[in-house]
Amino acid sequence: MPQLGQGILKGMGVTLQHLFGQKITRQYPEYKRDLPERSRGMLTVDMDRCIACLQCMRICPDHCISIEQTKRDADGSGKPKPYPVGFVIDDSRCMYCSLCVEVCPVNCIYHTEEFEAQAYNRLELARQFGERPVDPRVDPKPTVKKKKKATAKKAPRTVERAVTEKDDAA
Amino acid sequence: MLGEERRAEHEGALTEPPSSRLVSPDIRDEFGLETIDMNMGPQHPAMHGLLRLILELDGETVVRCDPVMGYLHRCQEKIAENRMYPAVIPMTDRLDYFANMHNEHGYCLAVEDLLDVEIPPRAEYIRVLMCELMRLASHIPSIGFLMLELGAFTPILYAFRERERIQSIFEAVTGARMMFHYIRIGGVKADLPPDIPQKIWDYIESLEAHFQRDFVDLIQDNEIFISRTRNVGKMSQEQAVEMGVTGPALRCTGVDFDVRLDYPYSVYPELQFEVITDTAGDVEASYRVRIAECLQSIQIIKQCLEQMPEGEVLGDTGRRIRPAEGEGFGRVESPRGEYAVHVVSDGSDTPYRVHYRDPSFCNMQLLQEIVPGHYLPDIMPIMGLIDPVSGGWDK
Amino acid sequence: MQTVLNLLEVEPIRLLISFGAVLFLVLNLAAILTMAERKVSGYIHLRYGPNRVGPRGLLQPAADVFKLFTKENVSPGRSDLWVFLGAPIAMFIPAALVWLVVPFAPDAVVADLNVAILFFVAITSIGALGVVMAGYGSRSAFSLLGALRGAAQMISYEVPLILSLLGVVMLTGSLSLVDVVQAQGDTIWTWYFLPQLPMFITFYISGIAEVKRVPFDLPEGESEIVGGFMIEYSGMTWALIQAAEFASMAVISAITVTLFLGGWQPPLPFLDLGPFNWVWFGIKTALIMFTFQWIRWSVPRLRMDQLMDLGWKVLVPMTLIWLFVTAGLMLLFPSLGA
C-alpha cells in the first residue's frame, strides 16, 4: 500500500457531507411536479375537427392509430366528406414520438399532460374516440406511397451510369 | 505465478489462441486439472444490459470469454426500411439509449447528405449544445456504473442526480425526458424556450461547483479503486486500433482520434476544445479520460450558449422528403465512440437500407481479446472501460 | 416475587434466562440493523430510506420479517438438501454464541468465563464452516466460487484478528473480557485504542473481513457472482443468513468496543451512570456499527488477491511488529502491565 488510506478517508468525508445534506427525493404521489409546456403525455383527439385524412395513421411508426373512415355529410353543406366513424389510439403501442401531432393538418390530435396509462387488461389501454369501436388488435396497414421516383434534386453519388449505345452514337 | 506477472506474459499476443497462454497442456493432463465452464448469463444485475458471457475459468482466472449478443435485438434496421424518412428518427432514439441526441444527429447527417438542405446556423448550434449535454448525461452515469460494478453503490446515485437534472432541461426543450425526437432532417424541431439558456447556465455552474467533490474526490485517490483499475484491461495502441475500437476506450491508450476534429461536422470547427488522451490503456485511464471529457463538454456548452446566433431552426426540405437514388453517410462522436449511419435510398419515400455502425457493438471485441488472463472480478471494470449500452450492440 | 429473584440466583436457570434475553436482543438487533442500514444508506444517497411503513418507516423490519416468513423457501433440485438447509443454522449459531461472553455492564455478563477471549476466537472460527456448507450444498458454479472465496477470506483474516488481540491480553494479563474492561480506566485516554492503535485498526479491518462486508464482500460479490454463496437461498433461509450476518457484525462491534474502547466505561469519570452503564456500551457499539455502514457505502470492494495481500502482507507484519513493541515497552516500563 503506497498510501496509508488517505484516499479512502477523503471519500468517506464526501459521503459524510452528503449524509447531513439535503435529500433530493420528491415523494410522488403526494408531490406532483409541474410539467413543462412541451411535455408529451398521452394523446387525445378532438373529434369535431378531425377530417379523417388518415395522415396520422400513415405516419405512426408503431401503427397505434386505427381509423375507420366513411363519407358523411356532417356539417350540412350537402357534400358528403370523409368522416371518422371509428378512431382508436392504442396506448400499449404509442411511443409518444409526436409524429401524428405534427402531421395533422387541422391540429385535432395533441398531447395532454397525463402520463399514467395503466389498466388491468391490455385491451382497455386502447382508447376509442369515435362512434363505432375499432378493434385495436387488427393492424391498420397504412398505405405508404412507394416507388415514385424523385426528380433529381441532387446528382446521384454512387450510381454509375452504364455506357449505352446512345452514348456511342452521340 | 499470479496476477501481474501472469498478465505481463501475454501482453499484446493477438495471434495465439487465449487458452494456450495459461496452464500448459502437459501440466493440465498430469494433474487432471479442469476448467469450469460458467455462464454470466443474460439475467445479471451488472451486465450493462442483456449480455451473455460464456466463460471458461481456471480457478479465478478467465481462460476464455465469449460474448453472446442478441438478447435485445429489435430489428431496427429492417423496420427502418418500411418507415418514411422522418419517421425513422424516433426509431434511432432507441438504439443507444444513453446517447439519443447523437443517434438522431448521425441519422439526420446521413439523410442530409442525400438531400440538398441548408441547415440554419442556429440549428447547428442547438444541435451541438444538445449533443454535448447528452455527452455529460452519458459520461457521468458511465463513471457511476463503473463504480457500481466495483462495489461502491454511492457514486451511481450521485451520477443519476446529475442525469435527472439534465433530463429535466431536455424535457423543457424537447418535451420528453429520454426519447427526444428533436433533431430533424434540416435542423431541429423547435427553438429553445426563452428561459432555457439561463437554466442551462445555472445548471452548468452548479455542476462545476460540485463535480470535483462528487466525482473526483470520492473516487480518484481511493486506494481500493486504484488497485482495482490500474493495469487492468491494459491494451496497447496497436491492439486497440486493430480491433476497431473508438471513443474513450481508444483515447485512453493514447491514439488521438476524435470524429469531431478528424471528420469535422456541424459547428465543431468553430469551437475551442481539446481531445483528451491518456497513455496508460487501462481502466483507470478510461476513467480519467471520461472525467476530462466531461469538463471539456462543459466548456463547449458555455461556448455554444455564448456564440449562438439568432435565426430560424429548421431548413426547408420541401413537402416530402424523397431523396434521389444514392447513398448517404453521416458520422458523429457519440459518448462511446464513432457512431455512423449509412442510408441507401432508392428514390421512394422509405429508405432502401439503413445501417447503423454502433460503437458499443464494435468495442465489444475487447472482451474476447483482453479479458483472458484476468481474474473473474476484473471483467466488470473492463466492461466499465468499454462502457457498452445494450441498445447499441443489439440494435 | 422474592422466589423468582431467588430462582435467578440458581446457576443453570440464570444462564438460560439471561441467554434467552440476549438472544431475543440479538434477533431484534438483526431486524433493526436491516432498517438502520437502509436508512443510513438512504441518507448518504441523498434520499430517504424506507419511510412509508409506520411513522418514518420504523415498522419496516416488521414488514420485512412478515414477508420473509410467508415467502417460499426454494432449494435447487440438485442440491444436497441437508447441507443446504443446515448452512444458515451453522452460520447463525456461532454469531449468537459469542454474545455469551460480552460484558454489557458491571456484573451483567451472561457467562463470566476466565477464557472469554479464547472462547470468542474459537467460536468465530466456526463461521467459515457455514459459508462452505452454503456454497457446497447449492451445487451451482456461482455459489462454489463464493464459498471458495469466503473460506479463504475468513480463514486468512483470523490470523490478524487473533494477533491483534494479543497486545490487549498482554496489557491486561488475563483472558477474561470483564478484566479487560476493568483494566481500561474510566477516562478516554486510558482505553486501549490509543496505546494499541495499529492493533485497533487491524482488529477493525479484520472484523470487517470476518463479517464479509464491503470492502471485503467478495464471497457475496454482487457484481459478478450475484449473491455468491447465498445465491440459491430465498425466504426464511435467506433471512437467517442475513440475521447471522448482522448478528456477527454486531458482535464484532461489541467485542471491538470491549477490547479497545473501554466496554461499558464512560469516557470521563463524571459521566458515570452506575448500573446503567450499558447505555455507554450501547452508544459505543452503535457508533462502531455506524462506521461499518459508512465504510460500506463509500468504498468499492477489493479483489481476491488484493484482499489476501492486505491480510498477509500488511496486517500480519504490522501486528507482529507492534506485539514486540508492546512487549518491549512493558519490559522497560513495568508499570504498564497488570
Image (cartoon, rainbow, N blue to C red):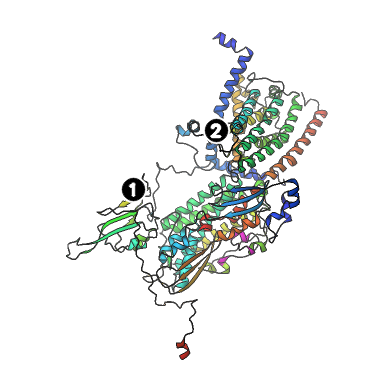
- Judging by the rendered image, the residue that carries numbered circle 1 is A124
Asked whether residue B182 is in view, the answer is no
Residue at the outermost bottom position:
A169
Q: Is residue A107 visible?
A: yes
Camera-side residue: B291 or C144?
C144
Q: Residues within 10 Å of mark 1 (few under 14, many from 20)?
A: few
Seen in the picture, residue B260 relative to C305 is either above or below; the reply is below
Range shown magenta: B242-260
Name the residue at 55% across, 34% down: C238
The kind of secondary structure element at disc 2 is helix
Instruction: Tell whether position B254 is magenta.
Output: yes
Please determine whether, in this image, residue B259 is positioned above or below residue B164.
Answer: below
The residue marked by circle 1 belongs to what chain? A
Please identify the dominant SS of the magenta region: loop
Viewer-proximal residue, B8 or C264?
B8
* The label number, if any, that marks residue C239 in the structure image: 2
Q: Viewed as shown, does residue B353 lie left or right of C253?
A: left
In the rendering, at what x and y percent does residue C224 appear?
60, 46
Tags 2 and 1 touching, CB below 8 Å: no
- Residue C270 in the image: x percent, y percent? 63, 23
